[in-house]
């Protein structure tokens, strides 16, 4: 069961690099799909946002086991794709996240620390 995620957010393509942004997006979707097919990650969802005046144009969420996602994040293939994307889109961000049972545990730790600090 997924206890972690990688959030990958991006802005608009760099002017003049629009075609490359489509190529890298397709390459990324293929890579993420292969990770899911291989069982390395549980799920991947990608979203494109409608224009809203902000700097986030779209994002993807890869969900899976924390150890597997850490290995994906550290892999040469993932880092190559992030580097390529960073050269063609603005405001690229990659953030590891907690979900599922690990989120419940993390919130328990948070609540415990609040109680300790309030004493």
Image (cartoon, rainbow, N blue to C red):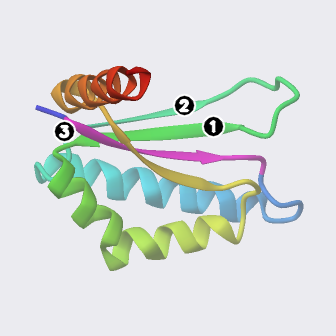
Quarter of image, res 20 = bottom right
**Camera-side residue of 90 and 101:** 101
Quarter of image, res 17 = bottom right
Q: Position of residue 97 (x, y in %)?
A: 38, 41
The 10 Å Cα crowd at callout 1, few under 14, some 14 to 19, many 20 or more, is some
Look at the numbered discs 1 and 2 and tell me whether their residues touch, using CB distance below 8 Å. yes
Q: CA distance from mark 3 to mark 1?
A: 20 Å
Instruction: Tell me, yes or no, whether the highlighted magenta stretch contains residue 11.
Output: yes
Describe the element under mark 2 as helix, strand or loop: strand
Q: Which residues are magenta?
A: 3-12
Q: Position of residue 94 (x, y in %)?
A: 52, 54
- For marks 3 and 1 on the same chain, the one whose residue lies earlier in the sequence: 3
From the viewer's perspective, is residue 37 above or below residue 58? below
Q: Position of residue 50 (x, y in %)?
A: 74, 23
* Residue indicated by mark 1: 58
Residue in view at x 20 percent, y 28 percent: 105
**Camera-side residue of 105 and 98:** 105
**Image check: 68 left or right of 47?**
left
- Give the main secondary structure of the magenta stretch: strand
**Image check: 16 left or right of 34?**
right
* Residue indicated by mark 3: 42
The 10 Å Cα crowd at callout 3, few under 14, some 14 to 19, many 20 or more, is some
Residue in view at x 30 percent, y 24 percent: 107
Name the image quarter holding the N terminus. top left
- For marks 1 and 2 on the same chain, the one whose residue lies earlier in the sequence: 2
**Image check: 25 left or right of 103?**
right
The 10 Å Cα crowd at callout 2, few under 14, some 14 to 19, many 20 or more, is few
């Amino acid at each position: 069961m997924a206890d972690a995620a990688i959030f990958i957010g991006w802005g608009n393509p760099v002017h003049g690099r629009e075609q490359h942004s489509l190529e890298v997006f397709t390459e990324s979707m293929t890579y993420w799909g292969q990770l899911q097919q291989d069982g390395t990650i549980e799920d991947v969802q990608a979203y494109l946002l409608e224009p809203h005046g902000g700097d986030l144009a779209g994002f993807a969420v890869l969900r899976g086991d924390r150890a597997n996602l850490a290995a994906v994040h550290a892999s040469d293939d993932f880092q190559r794709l992030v580097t390529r994307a960073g050269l063609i889109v603005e405001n690229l961000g990659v953030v590891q996240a907690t979900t599922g049972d690990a989120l419940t545990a993390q919130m328990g730790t948070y609540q415990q620390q609040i109680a300790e600090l309030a004493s």
